Image (cartoon, helix red, strand yellow):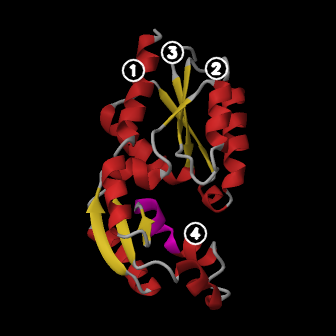
């Protein structure tokens, strides 16, 4: 498989990556995803990424990682430095979808902001309410969300149904709602580099 690039990604980005690969005809990219619910246990991410990288050595010409730091406290970057692998810019998907300047402006305007992406809207009940145990222990909700004031939906696609679900999530948590269309943000340039690197290897 020389002349191909591997993109190791968070499962929460799989739909967006597939959409971009198909739309652009990027046929030199293979995508392998780690479980999306590792968002709730980020300590698993560095070792999981390292395992994928080492398993791919010799099978791919180039390897890229579609993860931010994602709560690993720098541990993922330490792994990537050791392995010599590039990842997408940004601390988390909110930042690389919105862009660093826009995200920092949102944060500065209201630090008490809870963010959702398309994926998190679609899986709000499973990942947030059930994942954090709020469905079983409602008394946990103010512990998790008591300091938040607004919910910002960073949308990758324009879809009225998904936006309505994001609004419902904000109402469920008692937060002000704001919609921002980001598109695919920094994800597209990373995949373009992966395709170009593979094409240059022929």
Depicted 116 relative to depicted 196: above or below: below
Callout 4 secondary element? helix
Q: CA distance from mark 1 to mark 4?
A: 35 Å
Judged by depth in the image, the label closer to the viewer, 1 or 2, is: 1
Q: Residue at x 38, y 63 (%)?
A: 107
Q: Which residue is label 2 attached to?
A: 59
Q: CA distance from mark 4 to mark 3?
A: 37 Å
Depicted 73 relative to depicted 134: above or below: above
Split into 4 quadrants, where in the image is the N terminus?
Answer: top right
Q: CA distance from mark 1 to mark 2?
A: 17 Å
Range of residues picked out in magenta: 118-124
The reply to whether discs 3 and 1 touch (Cβ–Cβ < 8 Å) is no
Closer to the N terminus: mark 1 or mark 2? 2
Callout 1 secondary element? helix
Judged by depth in the image, the label closer to the viewer, 4 or 3, is: 4
Closer to the N terminus: mark 1 or mark 4? 4
Q: Quadrant of residue 126?
A: bottom right
Q: Residue at x 37, y 29 (%)?
A: 192
Image position, residue 81 (x, y; %):
63, 29
Residue 121 is inside the magenta segment: yes
Closer to the N terminus: mark 2 or mark 3? 3
Closer to the N terminus: mark 3 or mark 1? 3
Q: Which residue is label 4 attached to?
A: 127
Q: Which residue is label 3 attached to?
A: 3
Image position, residue 60 (x, y; %):
59, 21
Q: Which residue is label 1 attached to?
A: 196
Judged by depth in the image, the label closer to the viewer, 4 or 2, is: 4
Q: Residue at x 56, y 17 (%)?
A: 61
Image position, residue 42 (x, y; %):
66, 54
């Amino acid at each position: 498989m020389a002349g191909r690039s591997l993109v190791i990604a968070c499962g929460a980005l799989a739909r967006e990556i597939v959409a971009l690969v198909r739309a652009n005809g990027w046929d030199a990219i293979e995508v392998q995803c780690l479980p999306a619910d590792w968002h709730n246990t980020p300590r698993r991410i560095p070792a999981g990424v390292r395992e994928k990288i080492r398993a791919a050595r010799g099978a791919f010409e180039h390897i890229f990682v579609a993860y931010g730091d994602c709560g690993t406290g720098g541990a993922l970057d330490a792994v990537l430095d050791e392995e010599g692998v590039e990842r997408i810019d940004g601390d988390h998907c909110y930042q690389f979808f919105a862009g660093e300047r826009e995200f920092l402006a949102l944060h500065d305007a209201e630090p008490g902001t809870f963010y959702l992406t398309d994926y998190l809207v679609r899986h709000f009940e499973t990942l947030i309410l059930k994942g954090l145990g709020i469905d079983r222990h409602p008394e946990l909700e103010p512990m998790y969300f008591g300091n938040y004031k607004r919910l910002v939906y960073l949308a990758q696609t324009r879809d009225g149904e998904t936006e309505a679900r994001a609004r419902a999530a904000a109402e469920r948590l008692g937060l002000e709602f704001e919609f921002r269309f980001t598109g695919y943000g920094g994800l597209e340039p990373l995949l373009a580099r992966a395709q170009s690197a593979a094409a240059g290897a022929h």
